[in-house]
Image: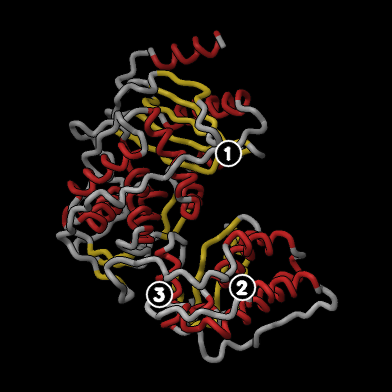
């Protein structure tokens, strides 16, 4: 410990312009494992984009926009300084690509465009960012812009940014894979991750965000997972990319040594700013899908519909080779009596008591002989599909498809479930949809906070 203190002191006190600060926590519990100058207000640089993305994810969850919303790029966004995607004023681009560019390339023009799309202006968005920071307990943080370029009063701390990193991991896990992508396509071109060196060099590293300005130095919030343990380490004021990465690796190593091998996961509580007034937008965006301004939750199904816990229990407890046939039985039983209740705009029709439960119980208690119910191999002329994202294992992708099929009987009852092995993971897809069904399904799933992408014929 004494040696570590001397190393940190020498590294931090060698006369560098950007002050040094660091923090290490056990992500599972939030326990602080190391802290140095962690409450000193400093320039966060592009660590700012962590909040830009967090607020954007929150806006998507609340139905203010979708991943497919088309954003018209303003002159202000197009004129932002590098790093940037190279967007042109007047250009239209989907929110999903702006998110990718901000998360992976740390593009300043994309970050500003997101802020304008969510709040109408970057100034209004910065106020919303600060309000969100306070709701997360980041009481020493004030934002003035969406990208992190140095501005008077735009300050945060190593402690606050570590807190934000933890919330990104646990509040929006469906988007967290963005931060581990070495490269991604951002709509206009392929972009590389600014954190790719640490991602490639450190075992278990899967994010989160880099930042650099002359006033801030080289900053990084990093997360790594090994077995049951996950550590988050934050550094402000690095002297170079290499020095910062080396220091973060040391801090992560320290975290894994100090953290218990097993600890009960205590997820942070996601704040709900639903009661906080949102400033009206002054810049309109054009969605690719005609949708309501807000996306209400679908109407609750009759009381005997299978709960999410029950669906997960079926998937987890039954042999994988039989799961599809059994869930098909339950789905068909539910479909025959509740087609009128699957859309949020149609009045629900009460179905006979325990119909779905009886179908599920029958399929579980009588497994022999096995009945494999399959769909026709043709899509019947329906060539549209939706993607629910990529996952580390085939089983995870299959489980998601089963769960989603039961939740969206009305839009996905005729779709084929398909898992494809891609270079960066197993992709979960529903194929054989009409354009309208694909668009409606994605709209409903996105309103619930799920990742979803509509793909046309040949995509």
How far from the left and from the top, in percent, is residue 200? 56, 42
How far from the left and from the top, in percent, is residue 91? 24, 65
Residue sitting at 73 percent across and 60 percent down?
317
Residue sitting at 47 percent across and 53 percent down?
183
Residue 116 relative to residue 289: left or right: left
SS type, badge 2: strand
Above-or-below relation of 183 to 228? below
Q: From mark 1 to mark 2, how far is it between C-alphas?
A: 32 Å
Tag 3 residue: 344
Residue 5 relative to residue 287: left or right: right
Who comes first in sequence, dot 1 or dot 2?
1
Tag 2 residue: 418
Place residue 249 in its image quadrant: top right
Query: Which of the numbered marks, if any, corresponds to residue 265?
Result: 1
Who comes first in sequence, dot 2 or dot 3?
3
Residue sitting at 30 percent across and 53 percent down?
110
SS type, badge 3: loop
Q: Which residue lies furthest to the front in this view?
A: 353
Quarter the N terminus occupies: top right
Above-or-below relation of 383 to 49? below
Check disc 1: other Cα within 10 Å, few if <14, some if 14-19, many if 20+.
few
């Amino acid at each position: 410990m004494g040696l570590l203190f001397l190393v940190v002191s020498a590294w931090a006190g060698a006369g560098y312009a950007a002050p040094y600060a660091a923090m290490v926590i056990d992500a599972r519990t939030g326990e602080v494992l190391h802290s140095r100058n962690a409450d000193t207000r400093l320039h966060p640089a592009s660590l700012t984009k962590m909040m830009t993305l967090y607020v954007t994810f929150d806006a998507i969850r609340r139905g203010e926009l979708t991943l497919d919303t088309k954003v018209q790029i303003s002159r202000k966004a197009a004129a932002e300084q590098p790093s940037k995607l190279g967007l042109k004023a007047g250009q239209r681009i989907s929110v999903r690509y702006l998110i990718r560019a901000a998360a992976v390339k740390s593009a300043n023009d994309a970050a500003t465009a997101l802020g304008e799309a969510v709040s109408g202006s970057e100034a209004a968005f910065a106020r919303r960012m600060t309000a969100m920071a306070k709701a997360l307990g980041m009481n020493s943080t004030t934002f003035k812009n969406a990208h992190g370029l140095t501005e008077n009063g735009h300050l945060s701390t190593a402690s606050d940014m570590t807190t934000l990193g933890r919330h990104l991991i646990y509040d929006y896990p469906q988007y967290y894979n963005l931060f581990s992508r070495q490269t991604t396509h951002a709509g206009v071109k392929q972009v590389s991750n600014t954190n790719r060196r640490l991602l490639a060099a450190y075992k278990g590293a899967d994010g989160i965000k880099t930042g650099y300005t002359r006033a801030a130095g080289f900053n990084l919030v990093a997360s790594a997972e090994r077995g049951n343990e996950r550590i988050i380490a934050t550094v402000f004021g690095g002297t170079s990319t290499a020095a910062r990465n080396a220091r973060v690796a040391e801090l992560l190593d320290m975290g894994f040594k100090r953290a218990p091998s097993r600890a009960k996961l205590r997820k942070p509580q996601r704040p709900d700013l639903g009661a906080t007034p949102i400033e009206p937008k002054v810049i309109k965006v054009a969605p690719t899908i005609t949708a309501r301004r807000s996306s209400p939750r679908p109407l609750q199904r009759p009381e005997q519909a299978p709960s999410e816990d029950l669906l997960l229990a079926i998937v987890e407890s039954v042999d994988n080779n039989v799961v599809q046939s059994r869930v098909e039985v339950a789905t068909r039983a539910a479909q025959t009596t509740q087609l009128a209740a699957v859309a949020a705009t149609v009045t629900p029709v009460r179905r006979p008591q325990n119909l779905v439960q009886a179908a599920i119980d029958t399929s579980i208690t009588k497994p022999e002989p096995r009945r494999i119910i399959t769909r026709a191999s043709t899509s019947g002329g329906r060539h549209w599909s939706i993607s629910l994202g990529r996952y580390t294992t085939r089983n995870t992708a299959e489980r998601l498809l089963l769960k989603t099929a039961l939740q969206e009987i009305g839009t996905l009852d005729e779709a084929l479930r398909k898992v494809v092995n891609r270079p960066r993971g197993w992709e979960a897809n529903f194929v054989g949809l009409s354009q309208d069904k694909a668009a409606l399904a994605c709209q409903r799933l996105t309103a619930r906070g799920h990742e979803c992408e509509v793909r046309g014929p040949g995509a």
